Image (tube, coloured by chain):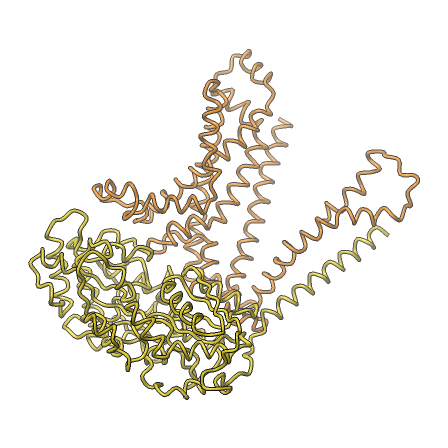
Chain colours: A orange, B yellow
Amino acid sequence: MSVTVASPRQGRPVQGRPVQGRPRQGRPVQGWLYAAPTAVFVTALFVVPLLLVLVMSGSRWPLLSGNQGWNFPANYTKAVGNRFFLDSVAFTLTYTALATALLIGLGLGLALLVQESTRWKGLLRTAFLVPNALGLASASLLFYVLYSPFAGPFAAITEQLGFTFLGTPDAALWSTLFLIVWRYAGFYMLLMLVGLQSVPFDVFEAARIDGATRWQTFRHVTLPLLRPTLALTTVLCVTGSLLAFEQFYILTKGGPDNSTISVVQLVYTVAFQGQNDLGVAAALSVLVLLALVVVNAVQLRAFHRTDVDAGTS
Amino acid sequence: MRNASRGSILRTLTAAAAVVLLGLATACGSGAAPSAPDPAAVGPNGLDDGTTLTLWTRAPLEKQAKLLVEAYNAAHTNKVELTVVPNDDYVAKVGAAAGAGSLPDLFAADIVYVPSWVRQGLFQDISASIDRLPFKTSINKGHMAAGTFENRAHVLPFVLDLSMLFWNKDLFREAGLDPEKAPATLAEYAAAAKAVQALGKPDTYGTATGLNCGGCLVFTWFPSIWAAGAPVISPDGGTSLLDSPAATEVYQVWRDLWAAGAVLPSSRDEAGPTWTAGFTEGKVGLMFYPATLLSSTQGFDVGVAGIPGPDGGRSTFVGGDGIGISKDSTKAAQAWNFLDWLLSEQAQVEVLGKNRDVVSRSDLAGNRYAAQDPRLVAINEVASGGETPVATNFQQAFNATNSPWLTLVRNAVLDGGADLPKDNAEITAVLSQQ
């Protein structure tokens, strides 16, 4: 928030725009006025809910009877002591690792494919992007029906093979990953394409003149120059996967046998399905938020450092 | 100066945030029940003065709720506005409204959640008004007990839903079974399921259930245990008794049925949405099925009986929804007018009975619509002998998607070496939470 507020004021002298004829003391007020809309939105939609969650996480707050007073830190010990807490953390991390590897790998692969192919470029790009037009919840519902052993189109085949899409823990995880890849691969391809197109063509040309093979070009030219894009996409993908909810809520409901409970789903279950304890749910949310801040900071720092190293070497 | 102004504005923003927050907190904290102890005090039927009342219910009872509300609106100057909420979102919606002090005048709740909701003060005390009803003692006892806390009644039955043994007489005939005779024990039930399965008809199975649906399993398997005379939870609702010999026998029968391939395969992962579909389409020989769906079994002949135990006996789960006046309603006298009408002969017989639904009053069990259909008489008779389990943490222990009850059943039926005492202790741990 402070960045938004500070920039117009600090920006002006640097740009060297004349400021005479304007009362000096008017400028801070004007700056605040410029910043006010953003500040109001950030306050109302981010700061206030965040503070509310923090208060909630420190209070006894059953869903049906509201705030019952301060209760710190019991909610946090209850949250960590929940019988699904460790399982859900482990599952979320597994899911995040798999989803990130698949999406970044496929996104890059598809982008290279689309970039190389000249004739089918438009068609390919459209084909990969179309699933993005569907909301994640709608896509999950679509796959719920596709996977259904009762109403789905593959019901007869899966019955003959004696297998169900969501019946075992592994099958449920991979079926959900397939949905996510189907839904998001196009989006990550698009981000990668933008990154690829920002790499100047003469660099590739120079590599080719130096006699680099395709693999060498990819490994030593494309990848290093794509680093900002890769940083952006991994941060997006890791954050999104750690917060996974809709797909599991709709497809598996945490089953079979509680094997696919993601952390956010645990938050939802604690809040609305059974325990009905908003205090513990808020405590879990705060823990997730802290974890996300740490993960993102580490990620950004890692990418930044390699950037500097690459520059000096 | 720059720092000072930024600081002061930040302070203002923080103060504003704090004010908003306090507002929210106090709004959420106002849980005191308004003082309206006897809505019928203004007159035995409450008030019918053209007030608009709001009523919430969950989607599975939409059909009955719509019929009741239409009939009430047609005969009264009060108007009831009905809101139907998807089943899975109902608790969240009621919770949010309860916190914000904006519950509707009347709302229905799954009867197994009623004890907890009454305890948390979501419903107004209507004992005094109920005491004036001349037919008080014939109102369904399971529902009344669920809505009673510290000897004060808060809830009346809205729609009763019973679990019953339904069998497809056409498939019974084909399999050489007596289509007019209901299986009297769980063993006979299993034998009949295997006989239908042995027909080898494509897409046709002996029986079906929802093995990933805690609510379905509570609804359909508890009665078998009750029929054997065994309780499922202690009277105070704090201890699970689901490792009793009777319960073990029930799991054993189902494990045997599953191993024999006589259960619809999709039952294994069935989480609830389509658990009755197989029978409704005529592709399942017999199953424990909700009585509210009697009118939706079309195109084949259906028999109905109470749910048998391992060695005979019959019982049922008296489920469905209870209804009460919310803590936030300022129109209790008008809302009572609806409740009073709901339990009248007019509503029970001419609306619910006519739609082949179960009536909430045992003195109306033999009404003229029931008399036309012996199956309805059977359902109404079993209703008065059925049970409704009462426990504050029922939802978390049994209905939730990650409930320990679901773990117990899946371990006992699908996996071999189940540790029943351990799984049962897990249910007790959840039930006994304060």
Q: Residue at x 9, y 56 (%)?
A: B175
Q: Position of residue A144 (x, y in %)?
A: 36, 47
Report the front residue among B416 and B254.
B254
Left or right of A308 in this view: A87: left
Report the front residue among B175 and B260.
B175
Whether residue B258 appears in this view of the structure is no
Q: Position of residue A59 (x, y in %)?
A: 57, 68
Report the front residue among A185 and B369.
B369
Question: Most extreme residue toward the left, as rendered?
Answer: B176
Q: Residue at x 64, y 58 (%)?
A: A48
Q: Position of residue B28 (x, y in %)?
A: 58, 69
Left or right of B238 in this view: A212: right
Image quadrant where residue B89 sits? bottom left
Report the front residue among B299 and A172.
B299
Image quadrant where residue A175 sits? top left
Q: Position of residue A289 (x, y in %)?
A: 56, 53
Question: Most extreme residue toward the right, as rendered?
Answer: A21
